[in-house]
Amino acid sequence: MAIHKIILASFIVYLMIQFSHGATKERLFSDLEKDALDVTAKPSRQGVLDAGIDKLSITWKLSSTAKKQANFTTIKVKLCYAPVSQVDRPWRKTENELFKDKTCPHKIITRAYNKSSQSFKYTLDRDIPTGTYFVRTYAVDAKDHEVAFGQSTNEAKTTNLFSVQAISGRHKSLDIASVCFSVFSVLALLVFFVNEKRKAKLEQRK
Amino acid sequence: MGDSTGEPGSSMHGVTGREQTFAFSVASPIVPTDKTAKFDLPVDSEHKATVFKLFSFAKPHMRTFHLSWISFSTCFVSTFAAAPLVPIIRENLNLTKQDIGNAGVASVSGSIFSRLVMGAVCDLLGPRYGCAFLVMLSAPTVFSMSFVHDAGGFITVRFMIGFCLATFVSCQYWMSTMFNSQIIGLVNGTAAGWGNMGGGITQLLMPIVYEIIRRCGATAFTAWRIAFFVPGWLHIIMGVLVLNLGQDLPDGNRSALEKKGEVAKDKFGKIMWYAVTNYRTWIFVLLYGYSMGVELSTDNVIAEYFFDRFHLKLHTAGIIAACFGMANFFARPAGGYASDLAARYFGMRGRLWALWIIQTLGGLFCVWLGRANTLVTAVVAMILFSLGAQAACGATFAIVPFVSRRALGIISGLTGAGGNFGSGLTQLIFFSTSRFTTEQGITWMGVMIVACTLPVTLIHFPQWGSMFLPPSKDPVKGTEEHYYASEWNEQEKEKNMHQGSLRFAENAKSEGGRRVRSGATPPGNTPNNV
């Protein structure tokens, strides 16, 4: 019985530790330095972009108003949802606590911080969903904590947005396979049923 | 056995899981074994097995059991297959929260109707064909997920797949042709619980299949479509196995079903009337909607919830979600057992208290789950919630056989349909709108469970009492005979149609609790209105 008590006690202690986790102060988005980097994101063509095909020309450089650049170690460039793509979709919600924030789930590239202007030609990934987007770059310090950011749109996230159309994920081969298996299922059933009825009739006649 | 030939409601015999001691027509407590029959298990005069040997696959009895529960489980797998993949599907199809919620409602709504039809299908074609037809004809609906490109298509396909949950009826019906009624309760209860496990298995299976397909090179938005081929193939495989290895009756031929019954068949309209006018029926419909119903709703939302709230990987969320459904393996029988234990000491009042306590506790743990902020507390709360909800399902069907003897089949069917209806309603209110976040929805679902379990206090049996009231002391109205015989009118009693009910009433006296068993033998039980 002693071992049961020990297991129960350690479980309770573990639970208490978990409970207390929530008490630490979380890092907030509002604490980050705004517009520390000037970011532009230019689509390769006009209109709605196709995932997997079209490209974005992204450039970023240190803004003249930046103050905390001494801490910058790495730059993380991410693709973010504009507010219109967040409506009725709570899994894309913007939250102030950085660990909860789901605005920018798609990673574009991560590069070491360089004072000079940087650029990257990004081909939209094939798993980018349909929606309206902008680009944000986070400046991260040596402890992997976000310190500052810059984005290709204004603070209200209304300008310079671009739209992406996702791939459908459907394939002709998949459709054909699906039809084949469905037909097989129905036919197998009918063949078996008719066969058994016929055998039963033959037996009855005997 | 006059009631095994397609009498209205007969397809639901045995579904309740607590009928073993209250067999409908076995007059003697010991079932005579037919020693001339050469079966793997001891059988009765109809060649139905009298023993339940779990790890055997011998034909025909145990083979039927395994074919039956696995096909039912397969249907649960395919009905809830979309749930753990929703984080991928919602991005591919550009779904909103409302679309996801509506698809969840659709997935449980189809079977409300199909379960009612399935009884008739089993009566017409037999349970083997009923099962095979449903499983193989619903395979195309599973495969058609590969065509879906928007919310409307997604909702439609989930609705169509949901029809296959009617295999519940064929499963229970088939087993009642193979197992003696003394043990049919245990057999059917085990089959129902293990079938429901499919809702947990799918949460584990689909993310793993999806991961494997992705690692093989497919993009996310194609991989989930290919993943649906797995439940589709399971449908075909189980259909073929059922057709080839299964048989309708222990002796093999179906034509024996068409025997002439000596007992006059009961009228559907009458049975329906007695089912519908018994207020206890509707309380159980509500109750089951908040034990089985919340189980189905949770099957639909829990994986996505863990994925989003705790930033888990898809297959990790799937493993946790699977624990919820898999608890059915022992939780549902445990609920029935707890009810039986309470009945041993306190009779029916004990059963009612047991049901109320278990279901309310389940509701409170659900509230805790919604309010849990860390992963560990959420998992603990979820497991306790699953035990409460699933044990409540078992405890519900431990009481349902006593509500009515004449209309048992229909009441069981209505209660089962109530489960699906409750699930649809809960998902519609709490998980389909932007008004509530998912954690708020879960919290309010827990509150609703507690509130909707309160009507148990209103269930009163004149012969046994209720949670707060003792049994009636009236010497006529306070007897089991009066309660069960009151479902027959004078003309029917003159034709002796009510004899089964009287035998049932006799056996049901044990629901009076210890005071009945330990008291003096009750005076002259022979009913004097023959």
Image: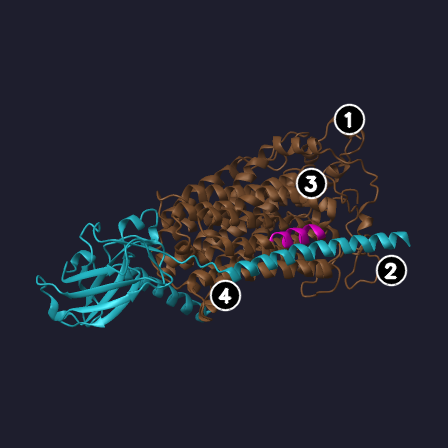
Chain colours: A cyan, B brown
Residue at the location (82% across, 49% down)? Answer: B255
Mark 3 and 2 residues: CB-CB less than 8 Å, in contact?
no
Task: Look at the image and tell me in which quarter the N terminus of chain B lies.
Answer: top right
**Regarding mark 2 in the picture, which secondary structure is present there?**
loop
Query: Which label was assigned to residue B9?
Result: 3
What distance separates the C-alpha of mark 3 from that of mark 1? 22 Å
Letter of the chain that mark 4 sits on in the rendering: B
User: Which badge, 1 or 2, is on the more N-terminal residue?
Assistant: 2
Mark 3 vs mark 4: give the one in front.
4
> In the image shown, does B265 or B67 lie closer to the viewer?
B67
Q: Secondary structure at mark 3?
A: loop
Q: Amino acid at mark 4?
A: Val
The magenta segment is: B129-138
**Is label 3 on the same chain as label 2?**
yes
Measure the alpha-carbon separation of dots 1 and 2.
42 Å
Disc 2 marks which amino acid? Answer: Thr
